[in-house]
Image (cartoon, rainbow, N blue to C red):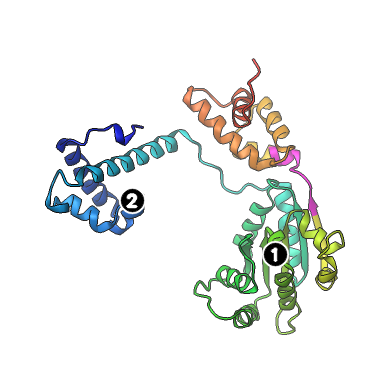
Amino acid sequence: MININEIEATPDFVLDQREWLIAHKAETGFSWTRLENPIGRAGSTLSAFCGGTYNNSKFERGNEKIAQEVYRYRQTLKAQEELRIEAPEIPPFFETRAARMAMSLATWAQRGRVGVLVGTPGVGKTEGLIEYTNRASNAYFIRCRKSMKTITALCKAVLIAMGNKAARGSSDDLSRWVVSELKFKNALLIFDDAQHLNIDMLEEIRGWWDEREITVGVLLVGNEHVSSQMEGTSRTAPYLAQLFSRVSQTMVIAQAYPEDAEAQAAAWGVHDEKAVAILKDIASRPGGLRDCTFTLEVAVTIARSKGEELTGKHIAEAFAQRASRPVAA
């Protein structure tokens, strides 16, 4: 890629970018508004540039700068396309032991129970639960964020997950709306990264579960803080005793299982014994299967760049490269 500040914006250069942008817009069907953010110019400006009327000039009075920005956009697209060709496609969902455990707990919770799933990052629990929502009716996946500080934010997140994207109103109105939406559904609410939920939000969830008019399952998913804040090892535990007393099952997945690394290797088409052994070792470390995915992406790219079949050598090199470790000879 070339630094656009090093390019001399001659009339020929400006004309080339203008013609390319006109052709690109026609080929993609993008509107000028759609092109605003990628290029960094207002749609009206881009339209005027392509029409040769920007600042009443075709090649000067600011046209040069716009042409440079269009060229930068072109370079970005080209680099992304080259990476797309070299980089591998990440396989779709593949079933692992951890995913089966997560889906089994979700099935249990959807019977109107409260469940807690604790797992270290990268073991595959989230992927398993998202897959469950794709298979089961009325199962909703809510990803909790640290910015969710209020009951209002919680209610909006739940309603959006249920398809109500224009959720507005007071916290009480929104909470009643949630209850109304849950009627006659035997639904399951899965709260991922539930460690971000505060006491008030957890108590609101308990209130939904206690509603006599509905049957709803609740699954709280996250790190060890999710269980510790209810089980008595956190200073918030006394305030959550009522919710904890309703938990019917807690499941802990401490790390990725060796067979999960084998399943991931098979999904990627990796059959080399040394490669699978390395992936098992990576999966046993913090980061688990997620780290394996990142490593495989780099390894496949390395192998393709060398015109070679993927082997353990490429995976070891990729893992070392990602961790900034020297590669053993």
| Residue 215 percent across, percent down from the top left | 72, 77
Looking at the rendered structure, the secondary structure element under dot 1 is loop
Q: Is residue 290 above or below residue 152?
A: above
| Residue 251 percent across, percent down from the top left | 80, 56
Looking at the rendered image, the quarter that the N terminus falls into is top left
Residue 243 included in the magenta stretch of the image: no
Image side of residue 119 versus residue 143, left or right: right
**The disc labelled 2 sits on which kind of residue?**
Gly
Image side of residue 34 versus residue 319, left or right: left
Image side of residue 305 versus residue 250, left or right: left
Instruction: Name the residue furthest right.
Output: 232
Of the two numbered discs 1 and 2 on the same chain, state the one appearing first in sequence.
Answer: 2
Q: Which residue is found at the position 62% from the left and 62% from the top? A: 133
Q: Nearer the viewer, residue 14 or 302?
A: 14
Q: Is residue 275 above or below residue 126?
A: above
**The disc labelled 1 sits on which kind of residue?**
Leu
Per the image, the residue denoted by label 1 is 197
Checking the image for residue 40, the label placed there is 2
What's drawn in magenta, residue-wise?
252-261
| Residue 67 percent across, percent down from the top left | 24, 43
Q: Classify mark 1: residues with Cα within 10 Å, few (<14), some (14-19) or many (20+).
A: many
Q: Nearer the viewer, residue 210 or 4?
A: 4
